[in-house]
Every structure is written in C-alpha cells, then in structure tokens.
C-alpha cells in the first residue's frame, strides 16, 4: 500500500475540522502531541504564534479549497535603515513598569488595612489606584506585558491582586469592553482575595497538601471577602460579584455556588480566567507550562474566546519564561513584543556568565525552545533570577 503524502499548507489556511501535524518536536509546542485535531479557534491562534510558517494536513483534506495552488509566502524586503539602539529606552520602560507595579502593591496594602477601620477611605484610595491602572493601560493602543516583581520570596495577596488585575484588564481591553467594565474588573481583581486575610496564615502558606477541613475553610474566602466589602455599602454589585464568584467556572465546577456559563457575568468570567492562570503559574513556576496546562486541562472551565485572547496577550513565550536561544545562550523573557518569537530578554551563557539585556528583534536570533529551571546551572539560575516569583504589568514600548 502506497504511503499517503502529507499536504503542506500555510498556517493562514488552517480551519476548524482539520487534523494537522506540526513540523516541531513535542518540546517546542504546548500540545500533548505534534498531531492536533483543530476543534477550537484557540488552537489555531496558538499554532499561529509558534515558530512555523506551515503545517501538514493529516485528515480533513476536503475542507481545503479545491485545486488550491501552492501559496508562496512573500517575504518583505529588508530596508537598510540606520540601526538605533533601543535597549536603553526598553530598559527605562521596564523600570517604569516595575516602579508602577511596586507602588500599586504598596497602595493596595494600604487600602486593605483600611477596609474595616475606614471603609470610605479605603474605597476612595482604591478608586484612585484603579484610575492609575486604567490610565497606564490606555497609554497606547497596543499595551504589552512586562515581567515585574516585589522582591519577596512569596507572592502576597496584594501582589497577586495587582497582577490578576493587569491580566484581566488586558483581556477586557482586547475585547473592547467599556471603561466602566474595565474599572469594575480592576476593582474586583484588586479585592478578589481579600477574604483570604480571614483564613489562618498556617493554612494560607501551607506547603503540603491541605486536609479536607483546611481546604473547605480556604474555600470560604470568597464569601468572607464579599461580606467584608458588602457591609460598607460602597462597592458596586459588579465588583462584589467578582469577589464572590472569582472561583466559578462556566462548566459549573467552581465554588461557592457552582454557577454555570449562563449565570456567570462576563466581567467575572474574565477575572476567573486571569486568576486561574495566575494560580497555575504559582504552582508550576513556568509561564509557558502554566499556559499549556490551562489550555489542556482547564479549557472546559473558560470560554474559548477568552482563552484565545489570553494566549494572544501572553504570547507563546510569556514574560518570565526561561528559554534557549538559537545561538545557544540561555535567557529569561522580560517583555512581550509584536513578534512572539523575538521578545526582549535577559540573557547569559550556560554558566551564568556574560549577562546582557538582548533586543532580539535587532538580531538574527530567536527562541529555540523552552527549558525548565532544573536544567539550568546554579550560575544561570542566579544570573537570571530564575526562581523569583512572576507577576505582570503593562508596558507600552513598541519598537
């Protein structure tokens, strides 16, 4: 029996229903196998973000255009323009994002301290913090994400709240939500875990698996937070809904009320997704692996549309991802760019030497593969600060 030849098509021609084979090793993409049945638009978007111009069609040839002639992908002509070293500007931009993030976390901590003793003051300061976040989001039409951190070994409730707010606001912005909805999402994200402060610290910070009693107590935190804020009579219902239902999922598997897609508000769905991804990130420590786990194991919990938008925002190599470059150096992704294959990175050699900030879009170098922290030398771990917790903030550097 003759061997069937695989049809090669550009990634632009992929449609739902095809079964395609990726021309990549399994370590270079977030799917379980290199053969993928395209059942959701988000799968197509993820493949478009990979380092491939084409795929092989395994099944579903009848869905392709009849008598399709091979499509030549026209490569843009290189323009010989005097090179500008944008690295200082990029560094400054990331430094501003870091400063803004730290201020937001500190302001959030101050707000949390006033919720019970001075609820009106807490609300006013929270509203000011939200306005700052909204202003930073809309500074340009195409915000990107940059890696930020607090310098602490553990991610605090307030740090987590700001990072979830940033991701959720980016999703809302990409979907053209109104500014009112963006504000509600920001405020709800800010306070979504405030109820955890009523959970004993030995439960919140426990490294081993929680007992059933401890787990059930922790699952009360949305109710604790909702009651705390509702008591003041100041917070909009949309914000209270986010605080109460940020662990609800569209398949009805969440808590505390087991809501399904019909009953779960759009704004709350956005925060639920951002929070779920951040929780996976805290567990797996690698942004790309967390994204892969979200896509593979949690896709029924969130709408395809929202997951697709999150994938576009994070890119295939989200900030904080440890990668090997095509020149065999090791790097940590610092900032997403329009070209997901050439982010801005902090790089070093395999032993941790020769550290430098690299602007890959100015080089003939791109990401070769994602690598795990345990594959790094001690020197590389130290240089790249690979074990540091990962959070995100807005960045508008677009060169």
Image (cartoon, rainbow, N blue to C red):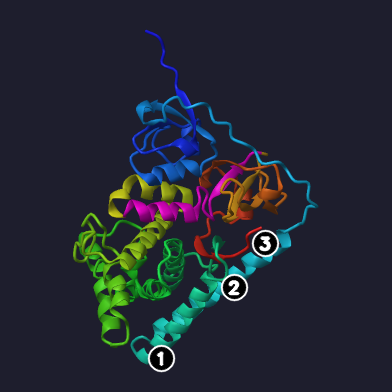
Mark 1 vs 2, N-terminal side:
2
Say which mark, if any, is on residue 331. none
Number of the front mark, 2 or 3: 3
Residue on which the image places disc 2: 99
Numbered disc 3: secondary structure: helix
Which residue does the image show at 54% across and 55% down from the upper left?
319
273 is within the stretch colored magenta: no
Q: How far is disc 1 from disc 3 in space, using C-alphas?
A: 37 Å
Task: Answer with left or right where residue 355 lies relative to residue 206.
Answer: right
Image quadrant containing the C terminus: bottom right
Q: Residues within 10 Å of mark 3 (few under 14, many from 20)?
A: many
Residue 118 shows up from this direction: no
Q: Is residue 164 above or below residue 292?
A: below
Q: Residues within 10 Å of mark 2 (few under 14, many from 20)?
A: few
- Which residue extends farthest front? 67
Q: Residues within 10 Å of mark 1 (few under 14, many from 20)?
A: few
Please tell me in which quadrant of the rendered image residue 247 appears: bottom left
Mark 1 vs 3, N-terminal side:
3
Residue 240 in the image, given as x and y percentages of width and height: 29, 76
Query: What's the magenta region?
Result: 303-326
Residue 319 shows up from this direction: yes
Q: Nearer the viewer, residue 74 or 346?
A: 74
Looking at the rendered structure, the number of numbered marks drawn on it comes to 3
Q: Is residue 17 above or below residue 278?
A: above
Say which mark, if any, is on residue 121. 1
Q: How far is disc 1 from disc 2 in space, using C-alphas?
A: 24 Å
Image quadrant containing the N terminus: top left
Which residue does the image show at 22% across and 56% down from the upper left?
253
Residue on which the image places disc 3: 90
- Is there a contact, CB below 8 Å, between mark 1 and mark 2? no
Numbered disc 1: secondary structure: helix
Residue 52 in the image, given as x and y percentages of width and height: 54, 36
């Amino acid at each position: 029996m003759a061997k069937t030849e695989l049809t090669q098509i550009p990634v632009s021609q992929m449609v739902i229903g095809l079964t395609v084979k990726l021309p990549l090793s399994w370590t270079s993409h977030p799917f379980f196998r290199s053969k993928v049945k395209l059942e959701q638009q988000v799968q197509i978007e993820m493949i478009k973000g990979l380092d491939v111009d084409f795929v092989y069609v395994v099944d579903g040839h009848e869905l392709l255009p009849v008598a399709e002639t091979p499509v030549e992908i026209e490569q843009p002509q290189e323009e010989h323009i005097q090179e500008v070293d944008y690295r200082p500007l990029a560094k400054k931009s990331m430094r501003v994002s870091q400063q803004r993030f730290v201020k937001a976390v500190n302001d959030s901590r101050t707000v949390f301290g006033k919720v019970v003793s001075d609820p009106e003051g807490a609300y006013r300061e929270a509203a000011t913090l939200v306005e700052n976040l909204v202003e930073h989001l809309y500074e340009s039409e195409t915000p990107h994400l940059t890696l930020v951190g607090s310098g602490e070994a553990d991610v605090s409730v307030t740090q987590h709240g700001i990072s979830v707010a940033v991701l959720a606001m980016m999703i809302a912005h990409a979907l053209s939500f109104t500014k009112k909805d963006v504000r509600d999402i920001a405020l709800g994200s800010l306070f979504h875990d405030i109820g955890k402060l009523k959970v004993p610290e030995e439960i919140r910070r426990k490294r081993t698996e929680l007992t059933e009693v401890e787990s059930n107590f922790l699952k009360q935190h949305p109710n604790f937070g909702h009651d705390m804020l509702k008591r003041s009579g100041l917070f909009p219902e949309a914000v209270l809904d986010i605080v109460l239902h940020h662990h609800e999922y569209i398949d009805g598997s969440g808590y505390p009320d087991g809501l399904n897609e019909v009953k779960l508000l759009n704004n709350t769905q956005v925060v639920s997704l951002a929070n779920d991804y951040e929780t996976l990130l805290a567990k797996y420590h690698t942004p790309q692996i967390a994204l892969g786990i979200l896509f593979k194991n949690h896709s029924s919990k969130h709408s395809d549309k929202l997951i697709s938008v999150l994938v576009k925002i994070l890119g295939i190599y989200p900030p904080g991802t440890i990668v090997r470059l095509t020149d065999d150096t090791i790097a940590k992704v610092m900032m997403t760019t329009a070209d997901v294959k050439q982010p801005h990175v902090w790089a070093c050699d395999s032993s941790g030497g020769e550290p430098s900030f690299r602007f890959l879009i100015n080089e003939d170098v791109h990401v070769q593969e994602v690598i795990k922290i345990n594959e790094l030398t001690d020197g590389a771990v130290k240089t790249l600060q690979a074990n540091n917790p990962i959070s995100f903030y807005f960045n508008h550097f677009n060169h």
